[in-house]
Amino acid sequence: MKKIIEIVAIILGSIAYSQVGINTEEPNSNTLLHISEKLDPTDTSSEVQSKGIIIPRLTEEQRDGMTTTYLDNGLLIYNTTENSFNYWDSTKQEWRSLPAGEVPDKATFEDIDCSGIEVKGTYHVGDELTSSNYLIIPLNVKTDGEYTVIARTTNGYNFFTSGTFLDSGEYTLRVPGQGTPKHKQLNDVITISVNGIPCTATVNVRSIIPRKKVLHAEVTAGYGYSAWDQASRNMMDAPINFGTTDESKINTEGFDHYKRVNTASTLETALKAIDKPDIVIYGYGFSLTAAANNALVDYLNQGGVVILFAETTIVEDLMEKIFNNTAIGYQAHAPSGGLYQLSNDNDVILNGPFGDIRGKIWGDDGTGIYLSNLPAGDITAYSGSTALNTTTSYSAGVSMFKHNTLNLFWVGDGGFIASGNIESGIPTSNINNPFATNSDYKPVIRPSYGAAGNGYYLGSTNVVNSILFANVLAWALDRAEYNGINTTP
């Protein structure tokens, strides 16, 4: 008992110095604990005590009953089952025996090209990594030997592999992933160590947006005005655009096109229902009554998402209610097949996942409208009042905008996403149906569009209506999921 008390006293008395010496008053400066064979390690004549140290002796079964984590890396015991020292290797998540013989050499490498590291697979919040999630690391092995690759994130998943290179040369190493991403994260940093040589890589951890209910409002089906049918609907439903595959541009379960309404009263009823839509797409068609406008304003104020392709006079009343401003004006503008240049705003609408269309041109389906006296601080205006292909001068105004706080996008053209009666491809008219997709239903530039005028020839211009609509849908999904009327805290 006396010796135990003496040792405890030595330890407690040494805490202030951050070192402990047992059988010595001068512990080695590189140690936290120094158990010496003699009182003065520097005195060659000092008496040597022929004694050792005994660490905990456990059977293999007792050892395996311990709960160990990465914090226990280096934990040492003596395994009485195999009569050898064991230590806990947290990188390999296993007990390892101290080798009785020569320790294998570690492999060495020429300079590692961190830019050549590839991150494979798709990473979704809450989805455990599978065999499709791994790193590809190109290595030029200088000398053979053992290797250990550890790649860590702070987001719930990591990568690990180890082994032996039997010869020098060029190798492509596959490092499997494990764990489950916890948070949506753009450019999630992966810190990589290859035998202690550091590298970094990044990965985008995406979340799959659940299926969203879409209410379509239009007076006439068959032209794709509200994306209820035809090419615009097929673009929405194509997994290559909106889906859960690795190739999907936007990761989402898609859209539930649960209802189409063709009157102001049925629109009002749908907006006031307990089970409200996540997104409303209004296309060319019926006039909006004052009651329907009130329902739209209430829906927007509750977080609803509205994509409005509207050119009727009642739009003026709706905008006055939205902005609480009776000075907002409405004006039709020509020509049929007008061409309008987009601004250079660098945001999700003009520079979104489906393409950068800043400064490009959109085409009006027939004729449309513009609004004046909109409060500039409340909106992001994307196009103005006067078409490129007309010599008529119109007063200042806005023909396309996104509200800066409400989930509202508006274009003064009811047929902005019209494709006629085609499921995909390029419509034939030069002044109608400005929406186009390819055979895979991907949004593409619509060629050969626009009326003649002001130096433009008939059908001489490429327009980007479908690419813009796809970017708007991506924005709408994000808003509906994270800041929408049905978003849960």
Image (spheres, rainbow, N blue to C red):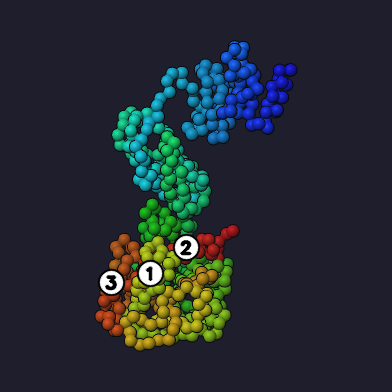
Residue 259 at what x, y percent from top left? Answer: 46, 68
Q: Nearer the viewer, mark 2 or mark 1?
A: 1
**In this image, 433 relative to 99: left or right?**
left
Residue at horizontal 32%, vertical 72%?
Answer: 463
Quarter of the image for residue 395 reads bottom left
Q: Compute the Cα span from label 3 to label 2.
A: 28 Å
- Of the residues shown, which amino acid type is indicated by label 3? Pro
Looking at marks 3 and 1 on the same chain, the residue that comes earlier in the sequence is marked by 1
Residue at horizontal 29%, vertical 84%?
Answer: 453
Say what secondary structure mark 2 lies in. Answer: helix
Q: Nearer the viewer, mark 3 or mark 1?
A: 1
For disc 3, the marked residue is 447
**Can residue 165 be spotted in the picture?**
yes
For disc 1, the marked residue is 358
Structural crowding at the residue carrying mark 3, measured as other residues with C-alpha within 10 Å and reported as few (<14), some (14–19) or many (≥20): some
Say the numbered circle drawn on residue 477. 2
**Nearer to me, 308 or 111:** 111
Residue 176 at what x, y percent from top left? Answer: 41, 39
**Can residue 230 be spotted in the picture?**
no
**Nearer to me, 407 or 16:** 16
